Image (tube, rainbow, N blue to C red):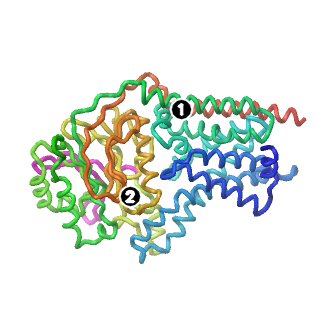
Amino acid sequence: MERLAGTVMLLSGKRRALVAFLAGLIGVLALPPFGFLAALFVSFTLLVWLLDGATAAPEAGFLRRLAPAFRIGWLFGFGYFVGGLWWLGNALLVEADAFAWAVPLAVLGLPAFLAFYYGFAAALARLFWSDGMGRIAALAFAFGVGEWLRGTLFTGFPWNAVGYGMMPVPLLMQSAGIVGIAGMNVLAVFVFAAPALLGTRRGRAAGLGLAVILFAAHLGYGAYALHVLPLPENQATVIRLVQPVIDQAMKLDDSARADIFEKHLALSAAKHAEGDKRPDIIVWPETSIPFILTDNPDALVRIAEVLEDDQVLIAGAVRTESAGSGKAPRYYNSIYAIDGKGQIIGAADKVHLVPFGEYMPFADVFESLGVSPVAMPGGFSPAREHPLLNALGKGLYPLICYEAIFPSEIGPASDAAAALLNVTNDAWFGDTPGPYQHFQQARLRAVERGMPLIRAANNGISAVVDARGEVISGLSYDVTSFVDATLPGKIAQGLWTKWRDWVFPALLGLFFLVASISRIGFRNRLN
Protein backbone atom coordinates (compact mmCIF):
# COMPACT_ATOMS: atom_id res chain seq x y z
CA MET A 1 0.00 0.00 0.00
CA GLU A 2 2.87 2.39 0.70
CA ARG A 3 4.20 1.82 -2.83
CA LEU A 4 0.74 2.46 -4.31
CA ALA A 5 0.33 5.60 -2.20
CA GLY A 6 3.70 6.85 -3.38
CA THR A 7 2.83 6.17 -7.02
CA VAL A 8 -0.44 8.10 -6.78
CA MET A 9 1.19 10.93 -4.86
CA LEU A 10 3.86 11.43 -7.52
CA LEU A 11 1.53 11.40 -10.52
CA SER A 12 1.66 14.51 -12.66
CA GLY A 13 0.01 16.15 -15.63
CA LYS A 14 -2.82 14.39 -17.46
CA ARG A 15 -2.44 11.15 -15.51
CA ARG A 16 -2.88 13.01 -12.23
CA ALA A 17 -5.96 14.82 -13.56
CA LEU A 18 -7.43 11.57 -14.90
CA VAL A 19 -7.01 9.74 -11.58
CA ALA A 20 -8.66 12.63 -9.72
CA PHE A 21 -11.63 12.60 -12.12
CA LEU A 22 -11.95 8.79 -11.95
CA ALA A 23 -11.73 8.85 -8.14
CA GLY A 24 -14.84 11.04 -8.04
CA LEU A 25 -16.57 9.00 -10.72
CA ILE A 26 -15.99 5.75 -8.81
CA GLY A 27 -17.71 7.24 -5.75
CA VAL A 28 -21.00 7.43 -7.63
CA LEU A 29 -21.31 3.65 -7.26
CA ALA A 30 -22.12 4.21 -3.58
CA LEU A 31 -25.27 6.12 -4.55
CA PRO A 32 -28.65 4.69 -5.64
CA PRO A 33 -29.49 2.57 -7.49
CA PHE A 34 -26.13 0.83 -6.86
CA GLY A 35 -25.53 1.35 -3.13
CA PHE A 36 -21.98 -0.08 -3.29
CA LEU A 37 -20.68 1.62 -0.16
CA ALA A 38 -17.08 0.44 -0.63
CA ALA A 39 -16.70 2.65 -3.70
CA LEU A 40 -16.28 5.78 -1.60
CA PHE A 41 -13.47 4.16 0.38
CA VAL A 42 -11.56 3.92 -2.90
CA SER A 43 -12.53 7.46 -3.92
CA PHE A 44 -11.44 9.24 -0.76
CA THR A 45 -8.32 7.15 -0.27
CA LEU A 46 -7.15 8.20 -3.73
CA LEU A 47 -8.12 11.81 -2.99
CA VAL A 48 -5.96 11.88 0.15
CA TRP A 49 -2.94 10.50 -1.70
CA LEU A 50 -3.44 12.97 -4.54
CA LEU A 51 -3.62 15.84 -2.05
CA ASP A 52 -0.44 14.55 -0.39
CA GLY A 53 1.32 15.38 -3.66
CA ALA A 54 -0.56 18.63 -4.33
CA THR A 55 2.34 20.97 -3.63
CA ALA A 56 3.51 24.22 -5.21
CA ALA A 57 6.85 25.96 -5.36
CA PRO A 58 7.99 27.22 -1.92
CA GLU A 59 8.18 30.80 -3.20
CA ALA A 60 4.58 30.75 -4.51
CA GLY A 61 2.03 33.10 -2.98
CA PHE A 62 -0.84 32.02 -0.74
CA LEU A 63 -3.40 31.34 -3.49
CA ARG A 64 -0.88 29.71 -5.83
CA ARG A 65 0.12 27.32 -3.04
CA LEU A 66 -3.50 26.22 -2.73
CA ALA A 67 -4.14 25.98 -6.48
CA PRO A 68 -2.87 22.37 -6.92
CA ALA A 69 -5.17 21.13 -4.14
CA PHE A 70 -8.10 23.11 -5.56
CA ARG A 71 -7.55 21.55 -9.02
CA ILE A 72 -7.53 18.06 -7.56
CA GLY A 73 -10.68 18.71 -5.54
CA TRP A 74 -12.42 20.27 -8.54
CA LEU A 75 -11.58 17.33 -10.81
CA PHE A 76 -12.70 14.90 -8.10
CA GLY A 77 -15.99 16.80 -7.76
CA PHE A 78 -16.46 17.04 -11.53
CA GLY A 79 -16.20 13.26 -11.84
CA TYR A 80 -18.57 12.74 -8.89
CA PHE A 81 -21.22 15.15 -10.16
CA VAL A 82 -21.06 14.18 -13.82
CA GLY A 83 -21.47 10.53 -12.84
CA GLY A 84 -24.21 11.31 -10.33
CA LEU A 85 -26.22 13.94 -12.22
CA TRP A 86 -25.94 13.16 -15.94
CA TRP A 87 -29.62 12.15 -15.96
CA LEU A 88 -30.70 15.80 -15.55
CA GLY A 89 -30.31 16.07 -19.31
CA ASN A 90 -33.39 13.85 -19.70
CA ALA A 91 -35.67 16.62 -18.46
CA LEU A 92 -34.52 18.91 -21.25
CA LEU A 93 -35.23 16.31 -23.92
CA VAL A 94 -38.94 16.18 -23.08
CA GLU A 95 -39.30 19.40 -25.10
CA ALA A 96 -36.18 18.85 -27.17
CA ASP A 97 -37.08 21.44 -29.82
CA ALA A 98 -36.96 24.20 -27.23
CA PHE A 99 -34.39 23.00 -24.71
CA ALA A 100 -31.99 20.47 -26.30
CA TRP A 101 -29.43 23.26 -26.57
CA ALA A 102 -29.23 23.34 -22.75
CA VAL A 103 -28.35 19.63 -22.32
CA PRO A 104 -24.59 20.29 -22.13
CA LEU A 105 -25.24 22.89 -19.43
CA ALA A 106 -27.14 20.35 -17.34
CA VAL A 107 -24.82 17.39 -17.94
CA LEU A 108 -21.49 19.24 -17.77
CA GLY A 109 -22.13 22.84 -16.74
CA LEU A 110 -23.91 22.17 -13.45
CA PRO A 111 -21.35 19.52 -12.37
CA ALA A 112 -18.57 21.94 -13.25
CA PHE A 113 -20.16 24.57 -11.01
CA LEU A 114 -20.86 22.16 -8.12
CA ALA A 115 -17.29 20.87 -8.34
CA PHE A 116 -16.10 24.28 -7.10
CA TYR A 117 -17.42 23.33 -3.64
CA TYR A 118 -15.20 20.25 -3.58
CA GLY A 119 -12.30 22.27 -4.96
CA PHE A 120 -12.81 24.71 -2.11
CA ALA A 121 -12.98 21.82 0.38
CA ALA A 122 -9.72 20.33 -0.90
CA ALA A 123 -7.96 23.71 -0.73
CA LEU A 124 -9.30 24.35 2.78
CA ALA A 125 -8.12 20.91 3.91
CA ARG A 126 -4.67 21.57 2.43
CA LEU A 127 -4.29 24.57 4.75
CA PHE A 128 -4.31 22.12 7.69
CA TRP A 129 -2.48 19.28 5.95
CA SER A 130 -0.06 17.08 7.87
CA ASP A 131 1.46 13.65 7.45
CA GLY A 132 -0.80 11.60 9.75
CA MET A 133 -4.35 11.24 10.97
CA GLY A 134 -4.67 15.02 11.16
CA ARG A 135 -4.97 15.33 7.41
CA ILE A 136 -7.91 12.90 7.44
CA ALA A 137 -9.56 15.08 10.10
CA ALA A 138 -8.79 18.15 7.97
CA LEU A 139 -10.50 16.58 4.97
CA ALA A 140 -13.58 15.64 7.04
CA PHE A 141 -13.82 19.18 8.44
CA ALA A 142 -13.36 20.80 5.02
CA PHE A 143 -15.89 18.59 3.24
CA GLY A 144 -18.38 19.21 6.04
CA VAL A 145 -18.03 22.95 5.41
CA GLY A 146 -18.12 22.47 1.63
CA GLU A 147 -21.28 20.36 1.71
CA TRP A 148 -22.97 22.85 4.05
CA LEU A 149 -22.16 25.68 1.64
CA ARG A 150 -23.42 23.62 -1.32
CA GLY A 151 -26.74 23.13 0.43
CA THR A 152 -27.05 26.80 1.38
CA LEU A 153 -25.60 29.22 -1.19
CA PHE A 154 -27.60 30.30 -4.26
CA THR A 155 -30.74 28.60 -2.82
CA GLY A 156 -28.71 25.40 -2.30
CA PHE A 157 -28.44 22.08 -4.11
CA PRO A 158 -27.33 19.38 -1.63
CA TRP A 159 -28.19 16.50 -3.97
CA ASN A 160 -26.01 13.40 -3.41
CA ALA A 161 -24.17 14.80 -0.40
CA VAL A 162 -21.31 12.48 0.55
CA GLY A 163 -23.06 11.30 3.72
CA TYR A 164 -25.77 9.55 1.69
CA GLY A 165 -23.13 7.12 0.46
CA MET A 166 -22.78 5.87 4.04
CA MET A 167 -26.52 5.14 4.30
CA PRO A 168 -27.67 2.84 1.47
CA VAL A 169 -30.03 0.70 3.61
CA PRO A 170 -32.14 1.29 6.76
CA LEU A 171 -29.59 -0.48 8.97
CA LEU A 172 -27.11 2.26 8.05
CA MET A 173 -29.61 5.15 8.09
CA GLN A 174 -30.41 5.33 11.80
CA SER A 175 -27.47 7.54 12.78
CA ALA A 176 -29.05 10.32 10.72
CA GLY A 177 -31.65 10.60 13.47
CA ILE A 178 -28.90 11.76 15.82
CA VAL A 179 -26.41 13.69 13.68
CA GLY A 180 -28.47 14.58 10.58
CA ILE A 181 -27.11 14.53 7.05
CA ALA A 182 -24.77 17.45 7.82
CA GLY A 183 -23.11 15.51 10.62
CA MET A 184 -23.01 12.36 8.51
CA ASN A 185 -21.09 14.25 5.81
CA VAL A 186 -18.29 14.97 8.28
CA LEU A 187 -18.15 11.49 9.82
CA ALA A 188 -18.50 9.70 6.47
CA VAL A 189 -15.54 11.53 4.92
CA PHE A 190 -13.34 10.66 7.90
CA VAL A 191 -14.30 6.97 7.69
CA PHE A 192 -14.04 6.82 3.89
CA ALA A 193 -10.63 8.53 3.84
CA ALA A 194 -9.09 6.59 6.75
CA PRO A 195 -7.75 3.70 4.57
CA ALA A 196 -5.30 6.23 3.10
CA LEU A 197 -3.38 5.78 6.36
CA LEU A 198 -2.46 2.29 5.20
CA GLY A 199 -0.17 3.98 2.70
CA THR A 200 1.64 5.97 5.40
CA ARG A 201 2.94 5.13 8.82
CA ARG A 202 2.31 8.14 11.06
CA GLY A 203 -1.05 8.01 12.83
CA ARG A 204 -2.03 4.72 11.20
CA ALA A 205 -3.19 2.91 14.32
CA ALA A 206 -5.03 5.88 15.84
CA GLY A 207 -6.74 6.94 12.59
CA LEU A 208 -7.80 3.49 11.49
CA GLY A 209 -8.85 2.62 15.03
CA LEU A 210 -11.07 5.70 15.29
CA ALA A 211 -12.59 5.02 11.84
CA VAL A 212 -13.39 1.43 12.83
CA ILE A 213 -14.97 2.61 16.08
CA LEU A 214 -17.08 5.19 14.25
CA PHE A 215 -18.27 2.69 11.64
CA ALA A 216 -18.97 0.05 14.30
CA ALA A 217 -20.99 2.59 16.31
CA HIS A 218 -22.88 3.54 13.14
CA LEU A 219 -23.67 -0.10 12.40
CA GLY A 220 -24.40 -0.99 16.01
CA TYR A 221 -26.79 1.89 16.56
CA GLY A 222 -28.60 0.94 13.36
CA ALA A 223 -29.12 -2.61 14.63
CA TYR A 224 -30.20 -1.30 18.06
CA ALA A 225 -32.71 1.17 16.58
CA LEU A 226 -34.21 -1.40 14.20
CA HIS A 227 -34.32 -4.47 16.42
CA VAL A 228 -34.24 -3.35 20.07
CA LEU A 229 -36.06 -0.05 20.34
CA PRO A 230 -39.86 -0.53 20.43
CA LEU A 231 -41.72 0.13 17.21
CA PRO A 232 -44.26 2.97 17.31
CA GLU A 233 -47.84 1.82 17.00
CA ASN A 234 -49.49 2.21 13.61
CA GLN A 235 -52.07 4.93 13.24
CA ALA A 236 -55.58 3.89 12.23
CA THR A 237 -55.49 5.84 8.98
CA VAL A 238 -55.20 3.97 5.67
CA ILE A 239 -53.37 5.79 2.88
CA ARG A 240 -53.76 5.10 -0.86
CA LEU A 241 -50.93 6.22 -3.15
CA VAL A 242 -51.83 6.66 -6.80
CA GLN A 243 -48.97 6.24 -9.30
CA PRO A 244 -50.46 6.87 -12.79
CA VAL A 245 -47.20 6.87 -14.84
CA ILE A 246 -48.23 9.66 -17.18
CA ASP A 247 -45.61 10.25 -19.86
CA GLN A 248 -44.21 13.75 -19.46
CA ALA A 249 -44.88 14.62 -23.11
CA MET A 250 -48.53 13.65 -22.57
CA LYS A 251 -48.74 15.90 -19.49
CA LEU A 252 -47.74 18.80 -21.71
CA ASP A 253 -50.44 17.97 -24.29
CA ASP A 254 -53.54 20.09 -23.64
CA SER A 255 -55.78 17.61 -25.48
CA ALA A 256 -54.84 14.83 -23.03
CA ARG A 257 -55.90 16.65 -19.85
CA ALA A 258 -59.31 14.98 -19.51
CA ASP A 259 -57.82 11.50 -19.99
CA ILE A 260 -55.12 12.19 -17.41
CA PHE A 261 -57.67 13.37 -14.86
CA GLU A 262 -59.90 10.34 -15.43
CA LYS A 263 -56.95 7.96 -15.07
CA HIS A 264 -56.24 9.38 -11.61
CA LEU A 265 -59.90 9.05 -10.68
CA ALA A 266 -60.07 5.44 -11.89
CA LEU A 267 -57.06 4.40 -9.78
CA SER A 268 -58.56 6.24 -6.80
CA ALA A 269 -61.91 4.43 -7.17
CA ALA A 270 -60.44 0.95 -7.69
CA LYS A 271 -61.60 -1.60 -5.14
CA HIS A 272 -59.15 -2.36 -2.38
CA ALA A 273 -57.95 -5.90 -1.80
CA GLU A 274 -60.62 -8.11 -0.26
CA GLY A 275 -60.46 -7.90 3.50
CA ASP A 276 -58.43 -4.68 3.51
CA LYS A 277 -59.88 -1.47 4.86
CA ARG A 278 -61.07 1.18 2.43
CA PRO A 279 -58.52 4.05 2.20
CA ASP A 280 -59.16 7.15 4.28
CA ILE A 281 -56.75 9.45 2.45
CA ILE A 282 -55.92 9.18 -1.26
CA VAL A 283 -52.75 10.89 -2.47
CA TRP A 284 -52.03 11.98 -6.04
CA PRO A 285 -48.58 13.13 -7.25
CA GLU A 286 -47.22 16.60 -7.96
CA THR A 287 -49.22 18.60 -10.57
CA SER A 288 -51.52 15.59 -11.03
CA ILE A 289 -54.57 17.80 -11.65
CA PRO A 290 -53.82 18.90 -15.23
CA PHE A 291 -55.67 22.24 -15.16
CA ILE A 292 -56.45 25.15 -12.85
CA LEU A 293 -58.83 23.44 -10.45
CA THR A 294 -60.64 26.57 -9.29
CA ASP A 295 -61.49 27.37 -12.92
CA ASN A 296 -63.07 23.92 -13.40
CA PRO A 297 -65.89 23.37 -10.87
CA ASP A 298 -67.00 20.28 -12.81
CA ALA A 299 -63.74 18.62 -11.78
CA LEU A 300 -64.62 19.05 -8.11
CA VAL A 301 -67.99 17.45 -8.84
CA ARG A 302 -66.23 14.45 -10.44
CA ILE A 303 -63.94 14.13 -7.42
CA ALA A 304 -66.99 14.15 -5.12
CA GLU A 305 -68.58 11.40 -7.21
CA VAL A 306 -65.54 9.17 -6.70
CA LEU A 307 -64.86 9.89 -3.02
CA GLU A 308 -66.94 8.68 -0.11
CA ASP A 309 -68.12 11.38 2.30
CA ASP A 310 -65.45 10.47 4.86
CA GLN A 311 -62.53 10.29 2.43
CA VAL A 312 -60.02 13.02 1.60
CA LEU A 313 -58.02 13.51 -1.59
CA ILE A 314 -54.58 15.11 -1.45
CA ALA A 315 -53.55 16.19 -4.96
CA GLY A 316 -50.79 18.22 -6.56
CA ALA A 317 -51.93 21.06 -8.82
CA VAL A 318 -51.01 24.46 -10.19
CA ARG A 319 -52.76 27.18 -8.23
CA THR A 320 -53.33 30.69 -9.56
CA GLU A 321 -53.86 33.91 -7.66
CA SER A 322 -54.66 37.41 -8.85
CA ALA A 323 -51.80 39.89 -8.52
CA GLY A 324 -54.04 42.93 -8.93
CA SER A 325 -55.50 44.95 -11.75
CA GLY A 326 -53.40 45.04 -14.88
CA LYS A 327 -50.86 42.53 -13.55
CA ALA A 328 -50.24 38.96 -14.66
CA PRO A 329 -51.60 36.33 -12.23
CA ARG A 330 -49.24 34.56 -9.88
CA TYR A 331 -48.85 30.79 -10.21
CA TYR A 332 -47.96 28.38 -7.40
CA ASN A 333 -46.89 24.74 -7.40
CA SER A 334 -49.39 23.52 -4.83
CA ILE A 335 -51.09 20.69 -2.99
CA TYR A 336 -54.85 20.68 -2.41
CA ALA A 337 -56.82 18.78 0.22
CA ILE A 338 -60.34 18.00 -1.05
CA ASP A 339 -63.07 16.34 1.00
CA GLY A 340 -65.72 13.85 -0.08
CA LYS A 341 -68.15 16.65 -0.94
CA GLY A 342 -65.74 18.13 -3.48
CA GLN A 343 -64.80 21.05 -1.25
CA ILE A 344 -61.23 22.36 -1.05
CA ILE A 345 -60.46 22.19 2.66
CA GLY A 346 -56.77 23.06 2.58
CA ALA A 347 -53.84 24.02 0.37
CA ALA A 348 -50.07 24.36 0.61
CA ASP A 349 -47.72 26.00 -1.88
CA LYS A 350 -44.13 25.14 -2.68
CA VAL A 351 -41.60 27.26 -0.79
CA HIS A 352 -38.26 26.19 -2.29
CA LEU A 353 -38.49 26.53 -6.06
CA VAL A 354 -36.11 24.99 -8.61
CA PRO A 355 -33.93 27.64 -10.29
CA PHE A 356 -34.27 27.64 -14.10
CA GLY A 357 -37.09 25.08 -13.81
CA GLU A 358 -39.78 26.83 -11.76
CA TYR A 359 -38.41 30.35 -11.76
CA MET A 360 -35.73 32.18 -13.68
CA PRO A 361 -32.98 33.90 -11.67
CA PHE A 362 -32.09 37.25 -13.28
CA ALA A 363 -35.22 36.84 -15.40
CA ASP A 364 -34.89 40.21 -17.15
CA VAL A 365 -31.42 39.37 -18.41
CA PHE A 366 -32.40 35.92 -19.68
CA GLU A 367 -35.63 37.12 -21.28
CA SER A 368 -33.68 39.75 -23.21
CA LEU A 369 -31.70 36.81 -24.63
CA GLY A 370 -34.90 34.95 -25.53
CA VAL A 371 -34.60 32.35 -22.76
CA SER A 372 -37.82 31.59 -20.86
CA PRO A 373 -38.55 29.44 -17.78
CA VAL A 374 -39.21 25.74 -18.33
CA ALA A 375 -42.41 25.80 -16.27
CA MET A 376 -45.16 28.45 -16.23
CA PRO A 377 -44.99 31.70 -18.24
CA GLY A 378 -43.24 34.08 -15.85
CA GLY A 379 -42.37 31.18 -13.56
CA PHE A 380 -43.88 30.09 -10.26
CA SER A 381 -44.05 32.24 -7.13
CA PRO A 382 -42.69 30.88 -3.83
CA ALA A 383 -44.72 30.53 -0.66
CA ARG A 384 -43.37 31.85 2.62
CA GLU A 385 -43.95 28.81 4.81
CA HIS A 386 -45.14 25.20 4.95
CA PRO A 387 -48.61 25.06 6.55
CA LEU A 388 -49.87 21.71 7.79
CA LEU A 389 -52.55 20.08 5.66
CA ASN A 390 -55.33 18.72 7.84
CA ALA A 391 -56.82 15.48 6.55
CA LEU A 392 -59.30 13.67 8.81
CA GLY A 393 -57.63 15.11 11.87
CA LYS A 394 -54.14 14.13 10.71
CA GLY A 395 -51.67 16.95 10.14
CA LEU A 396 -49.48 16.32 7.10
CA TYR A 397 -46.29 18.34 6.57
CA PRO A 398 -46.05 19.13 2.83
CA LEU A 399 -42.85 18.86 0.79
CA ILE A 400 -43.23 19.30 -2.95
CA CYS A 401 -40.70 17.56 -5.22
CA TYR A 402 -37.09 18.34 -4.34
CA GLU A 403 -37.99 20.21 -1.15
CA ALA A 404 -37.52 16.78 0.42
CA ILE A 405 -33.73 16.97 -0.10
CA PHE A 406 -33.48 20.00 2.21
CA PRO A 407 -33.58 19.19 5.95
CA SER A 408 -33.98 22.91 6.60
CA GLU A 409 -37.36 22.91 4.83
CA ILE A 410 -38.83 20.87 7.68
CA GLY A 411 -39.65 23.49 10.28
CA PRO A 412 -41.11 23.48 13.81
CA ALA A 413 -44.65 23.02 12.44
CA SER A 414 -43.70 19.41 11.68
CA ASP A 415 -43.73 18.66 15.43
CA ALA A 416 -47.52 18.64 15.28
CA ALA A 417 -47.67 16.56 12.08
CA ALA A 418 -48.55 12.89 11.87
CA ALA A 419 -46.37 12.38 8.78
CA LEU A 420 -44.25 14.04 6.13
CA LEU A 421 -46.01 14.32 2.76
CA ASN A 422 -43.89 14.39 -0.40
CA VAL A 423 -45.51 14.63 -3.83
CA THR A 424 -43.26 14.60 -6.88
CA ASN A 425 -43.03 13.96 -10.60
CA ASP A 426 -39.80 12.14 -11.44
CA ALA A 427 -41.06 11.16 -14.89
CA TRP A 428 -38.97 14.07 -16.16
CA PHE A 429 -35.85 11.97 -15.63
CA GLY A 430 -36.89 8.60 -17.07
CA ASP A 431 -35.63 5.29 -15.72
CA THR A 432 -32.27 6.68 -14.64
CA PRO A 433 -30.56 6.92 -11.24
CA GLY A 434 -32.38 10.23 -10.59
CA PRO A 435 -35.67 8.88 -9.20
CA TYR A 436 -33.82 6.38 -6.98
CA GLN A 437 -31.50 9.05 -5.60
CA HIS A 438 -34.47 11.32 -4.93
CA PHE A 439 -36.31 8.59 -3.05
CA GLN A 440 -33.32 7.78 -0.84
CA GLN A 441 -32.97 11.41 0.21
CA ALA A 442 -36.68 11.67 1.01
CA ARG A 443 -36.42 8.51 3.15
CA LEU A 444 -33.64 10.09 5.16
CA ARG A 445 -35.90 13.00 6.09
CA ALA A 446 -38.23 10.46 7.74
CA VAL A 447 -35.35 9.00 9.77
CA GLU A 448 -34.03 12.43 10.76
CA ARG A 449 -37.42 13.55 12.02
CA GLY A 450 -38.54 10.22 13.48
CA MET A 451 -41.82 10.32 11.57
CA PRO A 452 -43.36 8.43 8.66
CA LEU A 453 -43.22 9.60 5.06
CA ILE A 454 -46.06 9.48 2.54
CA ARG A 455 -44.62 9.80 -0.96
CA ALA A 456 -46.62 9.85 -4.18
CA ALA A 457 -44.84 10.10 -7.54
CA ASN A 458 -46.23 10.30 -11.04
CA ASN A 459 -43.59 7.73 -11.87
CA GLY A 460 -41.22 6.11 -9.40
CA ILE A 461 -40.97 5.81 -6.55
CA SER A 462 -44.19 5.96 -4.52
CA ALA A 463 -44.09 4.53 -1.02
CA VAL A 464 -45.20 4.74 2.59
CA VAL A 465 -42.03 4.76 4.69
CA ASP A 466 -41.92 4.35 8.45
CA ALA A 467 -39.97 6.50 10.90
CA ARG A 468 -36.91 4.27 10.53
CA GLY A 469 -36.72 4.44 6.76
CA GLU A 470 -38.26 1.03 6.13
CA VAL A 471 -40.60 0.85 3.13
CA ILE A 472 -43.96 -0.38 4.41
CA SER A 473 -45.51 -0.57 0.96
CA GLY A 474 -44.65 0.98 -2.37
CA LEU A 475 -44.55 0.90 -6.15
CA SER A 476 -41.45 0.51 -8.28
CA TYR A 477 -40.56 2.69 -11.22
CA ASP A 478 -42.85 2.42 -14.27
CA VAL A 479 -45.61 0.53 -12.42
CA THR A 480 -49.05 2.00 -13.10
CA SER A 481 -51.13 1.16 -10.05
CA PHE A 482 -52.10 2.15 -6.54
CA VAL A 483 -51.04 0.85 -3.15
CA ASP A 484 -52.84 0.97 0.20
CA ALA A 485 -50.98 1.04 3.51
CA THR A 486 -51.73 1.79 7.14
CA LEU A 487 -49.94 4.94 8.26
CA PRO A 488 -47.06 4.09 10.63
CA GLY A 489 -46.60 5.91 13.91
CA LYS A 490 -44.09 8.54 15.02
CA ILE A 491 -41.09 7.85 17.22
CA ALA A 492 -41.20 9.60 20.58
CA GLN A 493 -38.52 12.27 20.52
CA GLY A 494 -35.96 12.11 23.33
CA LEU A 495 -33.72 14.71 24.91
CA TRP A 496 -31.13 14.20 22.18
CA THR A 497 -33.42 15.95 19.68
CA LYS A 498 -32.81 19.22 21.55
CA TRP A 499 -29.07 18.82 20.96
CA ARG A 500 -29.26 17.68 17.33
CA ASP A 501 -28.81 21.19 15.89
CA TRP A 502 -25.52 21.47 17.77
CA VAL A 503 -24.07 18.15 16.61
CA PHE A 504 -22.87 19.42 13.23
CA PRO A 505 -20.97 22.49 14.54
CA ALA A 506 -19.60 20.38 17.38
CA LEU A 507 -18.23 17.80 14.92
CA LEU A 508 -16.74 20.55 12.76
CA GLY A 509 -15.09 22.04 15.83
CA LEU A 510 -13.70 18.69 16.95
CA PHE A 511 -12.17 17.78 13.59
CA PHE A 512 -10.88 21.33 13.14
CA LEU A 513 -9.12 21.05 16.50
CA VAL A 514 -7.54 17.69 15.63
CA ALA A 515 -6.42 19.00 12.23
CA SER A 516 -4.99 22.20 13.73
CA ILE A 517 -3.01 20.40 16.47
CA SER A 518 -1.66 17.94 13.89
CA ARG A 519 -0.68 20.79 11.58
CA ILE A 520 1.19 22.58 14.36
CA GLY A 521 3.03 19.37 15.29
CA PHE A 522 3.84 18.72 11.63
CA ARG A 523 5.34 22.20 11.16
CA ASN A 524 7.35 21.89 14.36
CA ARG A 525 8.83 18.61 13.12
CA LEU A 526 9.73 20.21 9.81
CA ASN A 527 11.48 23.03 11.60
Q: For residue 328: magenta?
A: yes
On the image, the x and y values in percent for residue 181 come to 51, 39
**Mark 1 and mark 2: Cα distance apart in space:** 31 Å
On the image, the x and y values in percent for residue 315 come to 24, 52
Name the residue furthest right.
527
**Quadrant housing residue 195:** top right
Above-or-below relation of 197 to 498: below
Decide which of tag 1 and tag 2 comes sooner along the chain.
Answer: 1
Q: Residue at x 17, y 58 (%)?
A: 266
**Tag 2 residue:** 426
Q: For residue 479: magenta?
A: no
Above-or-below relation of 446 to 3: above
On the image, the x and y values in percent for residue 122 come to 69, 48
Decide: few, some or many residues near mark 1? Use Cα within 10 Å; few <14, some 14-19, many ≥20: some
**Tag 1 residue:** 219
What residue span does the magenta drawing correspond to? 324-352
Name the residue furthest front.
274
Q: Residue at x 30, y 32 (%)?
A: 489
The local secondary structure at tag 1 comes to helix
Q: Of discs 1 and 2, which sits in the foreground?
A: 1
The one nearer the camera, 500 or 244, is 244
Name the residue furthest top.
495
Q: Residue at x 46, y 32 (%)?
A: 177
Above-or-below relation of 431 to 304: below
Amino acid type shown at disc 2: Asp
Amino acid type shown at disc 1: Leu
Quarter the C terminus occupies: top right
Determine if residue 6 is in view. Answer: yes
The one nearer the camera, 206 or 53, is 206
